[in-house]
């Protein structure tokens, strides 16, 4: 198998940085970035043909490749810049009346919380952030605790596949199954999932799913997708009304869902078109085994880091809850100052985030990371503990 150092050569990341923050913005593969630049050049060489004919042929191929990768019909997918954009599409159009509720957890991504809160407040609906006890105990306990927030006014379940601040894989399969039995629409925020864990949308049976390709799939920034089950597609308007509405040739396709959300006027959508290249790279490099190796390295270090910081893991250390990221509570007097110190003095790129009143330090493990990287983080934290008052 390719070594960590060899994988590092596939990325454009600076060699002087210990990069433990893949979860925030990913990092584009060199061959995928080269494809991106090639497509941008092609666009500029003949803009009119690319924006009206060729580009849409490429989009079709890109959707077909992604549909095969996540096991869904390509016509049920549209590309968007990021999952927050996808959440806004759904929240803006989802029919809610005063008193209706969206059931979610208090572990969700802040930008999505804001979007749902905004649209719910406009009509007097409730975005119910069901409190989840940490550390988690089991998948069964999580499901029971989550559905305590259910009531007759609940219209939709919105939940992360893998959370951002707490870096936990949630039991969305079990959540979707129970929600379907209850007659609820399910919307899964899979921002961190594609390329991180296998996704099978036919098996999952989520009604709506969004995922980022520019994170763990390693495509250029601004490439994500929204899946909507065919029966629900007519419910959701595009955020921008443009030529896709009441489309005429050359923009009209066989699907108003595609037309509405793909035809957004003049924009550079070449990042979307690189997704087949990223999928091909992962398949050629046996990414399932690469991810398993990363997961093993993560799980081998979770308890050790928790002990170092005098805390405990946020969940049982197993594949049910941990994949290639780990967030650990840290008693930091000034989290932002600590983060800058780690970067500026130790050249470690790692986020320190807030969850409620708690600070969490989160590392990500990608193919190029090694035990040496985590040892460097540990050494830096030990030295900061000894020489400053930033860590209690």
Image (cartoon, rainbow, N blue to C red):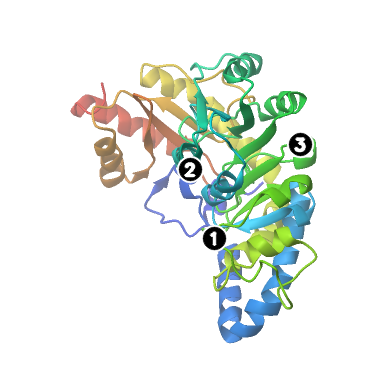
Is any atom of residue 260 visible in this view? yes
Q: Is residue 230 above or below residue 145?
A: below
Distance between mark 1 and mark 2 Cα atoms: 24 Å
The quadrant of the rendering that contains the C terminus is top left
Image position of 337 (left or right of 83): left
Q: Nearer the viewer, residue 200 or 143?
A: 143
| Residue at position x 72%, y 78% in the image | 250
The nearer-to-camera label among 1 and 2 is 2
Which residue is painted at 24% across and 32% down in the image? 334
Q: Dot 1 surroundings within 10 Å: few (below 14), some, or many (20 or more)?
A: many
* Numbered mark located on residue 61 in the image: none
**The image quarter in which residue 333 lies:** top left
Mark 1 sits on what residue? 220
Closer mark to the observer between disc 1 and disc 3: 3
Mark 1 or mark 3, earlier in chain? 3
Residue to which mark 3 is pinned: 205
Mark seen at residue 115:
2
Q: Give the x, y percent position of residue 89.
A: 58, 50
Instruction: Describe the element under mark 3 as helix, strand or loop.
Output: loop
Q: For the residue labelled by badge 2, is the local secondary structure a helix, a strand or a loop?
A: helix
Mark 2 packing: few (<14 Cα in 10 Å), some, or many (20+)? some
Relative to residue 157, is residue 239 depicted above or below?
Answer: below
Q: Position of residue 387 (x, y in %)?
A: 19, 28
Q: How many marks?
A: 3
Q: Position of residue 356 (x, y in %)?
A: 38, 25
Sequence order check: which comes first, mark 1 or mark 2?
A: 2
């Amino acid at each position: 198998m390719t070594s960590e150092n060899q994988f590092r050569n596939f990325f454009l990341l600076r060699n002087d940085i210990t990069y433990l923050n893949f979860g925030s913005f990913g990092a584009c593969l060199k061959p995928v970035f080269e494809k991106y630049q090639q497509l941008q050049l092609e666009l500029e060489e003949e803009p009119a043909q690319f924006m009206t004919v060729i580009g849409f042929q490429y989009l079709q191929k890109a959707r077909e490749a992604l549909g095969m990768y996540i096991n869904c019909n390509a016509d049920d997918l549209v590309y968007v810049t990021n999952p927050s954009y996808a959440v806004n599409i759904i929240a803006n159009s989802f029919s809610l009346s005063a008193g209706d509720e969206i059931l979610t957890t208090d572990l969700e991504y802040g930008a999505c919380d804001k979007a749902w809160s905004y649209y719910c407040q406009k009509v007097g609906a409730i975005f119910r952030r069901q409190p989840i006890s940490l550390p988690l105990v089991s998948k069964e306990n999580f499901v029971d605790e989550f559905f305590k927030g259910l009531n007759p006014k609940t219209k939709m379940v919105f939940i992360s596949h893998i959370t951002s601040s707490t870096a936990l894989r949630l039991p969305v399969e079990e959540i979707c199954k129970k929600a379907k039995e209850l007659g609820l629409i399910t919307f899964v925020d899979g921002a961190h999932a594609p390329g991180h864990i296998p996704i099978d949308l036919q098996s999952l049976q989520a009604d709506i799913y969004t995922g980022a390709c520019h994170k763990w799939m390693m495509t250029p920034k601004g490439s994500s997708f929204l899946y909507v089950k065919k029966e629900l597609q007519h419910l959701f308007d595009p955020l921008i009304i443009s030529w896709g509405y009441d489309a005429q040739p050359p923009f009209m396709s066989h699907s108003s869902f595609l037309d509405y959300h793909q035809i957004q006027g003049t924009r550079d959508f070449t990042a979307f078109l690189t997704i087949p290249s990223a999928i091909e790279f992962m398949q050629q490099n046996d990414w399932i085994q690469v991810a398993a190796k990363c997961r093993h390295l993560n799980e081998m270090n979770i308890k050790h880091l928790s002990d170092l910081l005098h805390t405990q893991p946020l969940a049982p250390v197993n594949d049910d809850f941990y994949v290639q990221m780990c967030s650990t509570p840290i008693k930091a007097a000034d989290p932002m100052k600590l983060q800058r110190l780690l970067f500026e003095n130790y050249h470690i790129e790692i986020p320190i985030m807030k969850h409620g009143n708690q600070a969490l330090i989160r590392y990500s493990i990608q193919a190029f990371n090694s035990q040496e990287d985590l040892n460097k983080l540990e050494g830096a934290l030990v030295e900061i503990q000894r020489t400053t008052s930033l860590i209690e």
